[in-house]
Image (cartoon, rainbow, N blue to C red):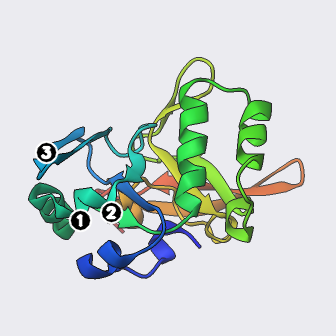
């Protein structure tokens, strides 16, 4: 199950949830959370969406932070209970340090494999995705299910997911292997 497919929980449900919580930044801005709550404090940061540290483990105490609650209600951050988010964090961390493909597979193998994690593909966001010289994704990382890939769903990060209508999928066959390519719609192309 992907993060978007999990049931959205209310704040009281999240507080009662027994498992690990995850948070992801849906904005192009870095977020910093530092707050003292009683005799405890919450300190963590989230990089912009698509960056290696844009997804993190969320301490339960953070649910009491008014600023975080407001960001969550606005959709600027997503809070998830999906255990596959841990796989996404591991994958992003491995790529951030430039781990080899083999090492990333080893790291991912340490996690309990679910059918969903086996079916996840990593893509570049069509709007902001870019790789460094070593081929490691620096920005605009998108995780898609194999079903989304097969259906020709444009890979777009959370920041650009509202632009799906701007990309037309085109099925391409190279050496007997089919894959989708995406053409950006030009708004001036409405002439007949």
Specify the quadrant of the image occupied by residue 173: bottom right
**What is the x, y in percent for residue 69?**
16, 64
**Of pointers 3 and 1, the one earlier in the residue sequence:** 3
For residue 78, which numbered disc appears in the image? Answer: 2
**What is the x, y in percent for residue 102?**
80, 33
- Tell me the mark number nearer the camera, choosing from 3 and 2: 3
Q: Residues within 10 Å of mark 2 (few under 14, many from 20)?
A: some
**Residue for badge 3:** 35
Q: What residue appears at the point 32 percent right and 61 percent down from the top-left corner?
A: 60
Marks 1 and 2 in Cβ contact (< 8 Å): yes
Quarter of the image that includes the C terminus: bottom left
Specify the quadrant of the image occupied by residue 171: bottom right
Quarter of the image that includes the N terminus: bottom right
Residue situated in front as seen by the camera: 120 or 15 = 15
**What is the x, y in percent for residue 129?**
46, 39
Q: What residue appears at the point 45 percent right and 69 percent down from the top-left corner?
A: 81
**What is the x, y in percent for residue 65?**
15, 58
Q: CA distance from mark 3 to mark 1?
A: 21 Å
How many callouts does the rendering have? 3
Q: CA distance from mark 1 to mark 2?
A: 6 Å
**Of pointers 3 and 2, the one earlier in the residue sequence:** 3
């Amino acid at each position: 199950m992907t993060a978007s497919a999990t049931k959205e929980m209310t704040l009281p449900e999240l507080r009662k949830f027994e498992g690990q919580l995850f948070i992801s930044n849906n904005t192009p801005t870095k977020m910093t959370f530092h707050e003292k709550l009683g005799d405890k404090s919450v300190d963590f940061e989230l990089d912009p969406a698509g960056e290696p540290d844009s997804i993190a483990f969320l301490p339960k105490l953070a649910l009491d932070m008014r600023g975080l609650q407001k960001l969550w209600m606005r959709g600027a951050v997503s809070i998830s209970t999906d255990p596959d988010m841990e796989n996404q964090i591991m994958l992003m961390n491995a790529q951030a340090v430039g781990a080899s493909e083999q090492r990333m597979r080893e790291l991912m193998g340490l996690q309990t494999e679910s059918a969903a994690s086996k079916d996840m593909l990593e893509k570049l966001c069509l709007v902001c995705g870019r790789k460094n010289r070593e081929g490691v994704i620096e920005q605009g990382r998108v995780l898609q299910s194999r079903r989304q890939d097969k259906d020709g769903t444009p890979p777009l990060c959370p920041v650009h997911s509202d632009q799906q209508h701007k990309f037309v999928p085109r099925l391409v066959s190279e050496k007997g292997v089919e894959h989708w390519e995406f053409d950006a719609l030009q708004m001036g192309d409405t002439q007949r």
